[in-house]
Image (cartoon, helix red, strand yellow):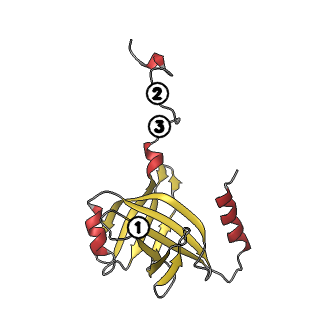
Amino acid sequence: MPTAAEQSRDEAYASGPVDQVVRHVVELDHPSFDAPLYFMAAVEEDVTITLENGTSVTAIACAFDLTPPGFEDSGPTPAQLSIDGVSYKLFPVLKDAVGAGSIKVTYRAYLGDDLATPVDLIEGLELKKVSLSATSAQGELSFKEIATQAFPRRTYDIETYPGLWNS
């Protein structure tokens, strides 16, 4: 059963006028950054957006492509993020951050010109395996908690599974 947030998102997408475009925003955050960086695709100039907590921030106009995870014959494929035009805005900060751990990523979507209410929010992503060139940055997106959780979400301790331990 979908959560309330997923139901709201689906309703917003389904009931939005056909002449309104979904605006995609990516937030990048790393301890080496002075403040999180916000990028919006499909706009010509930087714009002010309102986050879900009511804070207003400036989103930098920047082309990027977000590819969702997939599946091929060889197994699952990770999500990919590619940001173009990073030469003067993002290259210096990404270069410093790449060697110092993963970069936290949050995806937001806004419907049409309403930049005050995000209609979709995906938190907890991490940008890994980043490759930088003079004009673009590319990397894999993953959820940290999925990779570190025990399967099937149980801890195999001596009280629960005594047969796994040597006496």
Which of the two discs, 3 and 1, labels the residue nearer the N terminus?
Answer: 1
Q: Quadrant of the C terminus?
A: top left
Left-right relation of 87 to 26: left
Rendered view: 80 above or below 46: above
Mark found first going from the N terminus, 1 or 2? 1
Say left or right for 22 vs 165.
Answer: right
Across and down, in percent, residue 91 comes to: 30, 74
- x, y (%) of residue 38? 44, 74
Tell me the CA gap for discs 1 and 2.
Answer: 36 Å
Residue pushed farthest bottom? 44
**Disc 2 residue crowd, few under 14, some 14–19, many 20+, Cα 10 Å:** some
* 6 over 157 or under it: above or below: below
Residue 156 disc label: 2
Query: Residue 112: which numbered mark, if any?
Result: none
Q: Residue at x 46, y 78 (%)?
A: 59
Disc 3 secondary structure class: loop
Considering depth in this image, is 72 or 81 the residue closer to the camera? 81
**99 with respect to 46 (left or right):** left
Q: State the separation of the CA atoms marked 3 and 1.
A: 27 Å
Q: Are marks 1 and 2 in contact (CB under 8 Å)?
A: no
The label on residue 28 is: 1
At x 44%, y 19%, the residue is 164
| 125 with respect to 98 (left or right) | right
Amino acid tagged 2: Tyr
Residue 137, given in percent of the width and then of the height, sits at: 35, 70
Q: Is mark 2 in CB contact (under 8 Å) with mark 3?
A: yes
**Mark 3 highlights which residue?**
150
Q: Amino acid at mark 1?
A: Leu
Q: Earlier in the sequence, mark 2 or mark 3?
A: 3
Q: What type is the residue that disc 3 sits on? A: Ala
